[in-house]
Amino acid sequence: MTEGAKGLAKGKVYIVGAGPGDPELLTVRARRIIEGASVVVHDALVSSAVLSMVREGALIIDAGKRRGKHRMEQDEINDLLVRLASEGKDIVRLKGGDPFVFGRGAEEALHLRRAGIEFEVIPGLSSALAGPSLSLLPLTVRGVSDRILIMSARGAEGAAVSWDCLNVSGQTIVFMMGISSAAEISSGLISRGMRPETPAAIILNASLGTQRVIVTDLLNLGKSCAEAGDDAAGLIVVGETVNYMTRLADGS
Amino acid sequence: MTEGAKGLAKGKVYIVGAGPGDPELLTVRARRIIEGASVVVHDALVSSAVLSMVREGALIIDAGKRRGKHRMEQDEINDLLVRLASEGKDIVRLKGGDPFVFGRGAEEALHLRRAGIEFEVIPGLSSALAGPSLSLLPLTVRGVSDRILIMSARGAEGAAVSWDCLNVSGQTIVFMMGISSAAEISSGLISRGMRPETPAAIILNASLGTQRVIVTDLLNLGKSCAEAGDDAAGLIVVGETVNYMTRLADGS
């Protein structure tokens, strides 16, 4: 019995987390899979340094999506993966960070399952946690913060941010993709009772040679982000543990 | 001019995230540092598979701490790191998951900074995110959940869990180190208005050959965990995205 188009055995899709950008921060398994790939379908957030690990002659398809300038709709990507796998090709579906953390990995995986395509998920370092660690910004500190809230600065499909329960004592908030929404985050949190002096950090290009970290406070967050320049994958961290960046730098 | 004890140059401490347990899920950089280490000081949550990457003849010190049976107090660990580095040794301080996510990495780093010891943090996959990904449990799904709350099932120093703002629509909660507190989590969340039918998952030994995932609901969480057996590093995930595990398994 044969399967798939033209009687070929179907290929397998490896849904791989590419981490924050530095190829040294790929997992050992992800690195090996990427280096061995003959077909790679990647997002916009995958760094060029990671893509340079793909061997010469491999087919590399940029399915990158950025806000406001979609290159390929999600449905098209789903169909592309099924079509390539149905041709018998093993595919590396490469996503920035971790595929199941704001990566729509579950949507693609569900589509593959329904099409009878085998897949495997290889986790990657989400910048939500790795970006702060690389910046010496601890998200938890005993007696200061014992909760980490990770959220997108934009709701799904461009919906408004959910402001419920953001002003919680002992909670550090990590906003992903938040640089361009910084002023809204600032005013939204302050209007819901968070102190304007609450420390905040902006992390751009985490793990790359161009990594920048800016320490500010909630009141000045919008201005600081405007000065910092945009990075679609930039992070904003709000909470008292941001003070530990300074302490770790000078020992205070 | 000489530095440190006996005029030796001080060593450097690499504070390295060991990830969830599978050595294939170490970062490339962590793997290289571990393989090259001559002194390793590790936590209880570091897997034996990761420790087997350390070369023969290296000094391996188990500073593992588990609840209720502390092997080495935090102060002792801090002093040990300073003493070893002051002897001129480079040290790998190996911590389960990511060192800055519930890892007390910041406390150790601050102690090192104050002692004038150079250090570097190498992030690792936190089981809080990687465990669900490896279990095909997406923590975010468009239109279902756009917030991830990571918290410890025990407060700092054994303090009570903070129950503020846990029952939030569109939020997935990941409780770390929560298996033995499952009954308390169940009753705590239900008494604060969360539906008893809210889906929940228990993830044990994430990434290892012994990985187990149990799907249950909030009402039965305590019983399910009691039956599952303890794993100090086990995870409990509560939220609607747990339903996607089933959907990803059967395509529904």
Image: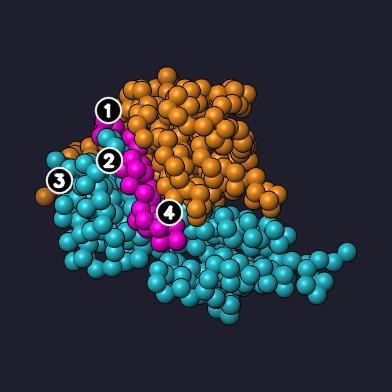
Chain colours: A cyan, B orange
Residues at marks 1 and 3, CA–CA distance in whole angstroms: 32 Å
Q: Is residue B203 left or right of residue A140?
A: right
What kind of element bears circle 3? Answer: loop
Q: Nearer the viewer, residue A44 or B96?
A: A44
Q: Amino acid at mark 3?
A: Glu
* Residue position marked by numbered label 2 in the rendering: A167
| Residue A240 in view | yes
Q: Which residue is mark 3?
A: A197
Q: Amino acid at mark 1?
A: Asp
**Residue B41, quarter of the rendered image:** top left
The relative height of residue B10 versus residue A74 in the rendered view (above or below) is above
Circle 3 packing at 10 Å, graded few (<14), some (14-19), many (20+), is: some
On the image, the x and y values in percent for residue A104 come to 52, 58
Mark 2 neighbour density, 10 Å: few (under 14) some (14–19) many (20 or more) = some
- Which label lies toward us, 3 or 2? 2
Spatial separation of the CA atoms under disc 3 and disc 4? 28 Å
The reply to whether dot 2 and dot 4 touch (C-beta < 8 Å) is no
Q: Which kind of residue does numbered mark 4 sit on?
A: Ser
Residue A24 % position (x, y):
42, 60
Distance of label 2 from label 4 (alpha carbons): 24 Å
Residue at disc 1, secondary structure: helix
Labels 3 and 2: the sequence-earlier one: 2
Q: How much space separates mark 1 and mark 4, taking CA atoms?
A: 31 Å
Label 1, residues with CA under 10 Å away: few <14, some 14-19, many ≥20: few
In the rendered structure, which amino acid carries the disc numbered 2?
Answer: Asn
Q: Secondary structure at mark 4?
A: loop
State the extent of the magenta-drawn residues as a range.
A141-167
C-alpha span from label 1 to label 2: 33 Å
**Residue at figure coordinates x 70%, y 66% from the top left:** A11
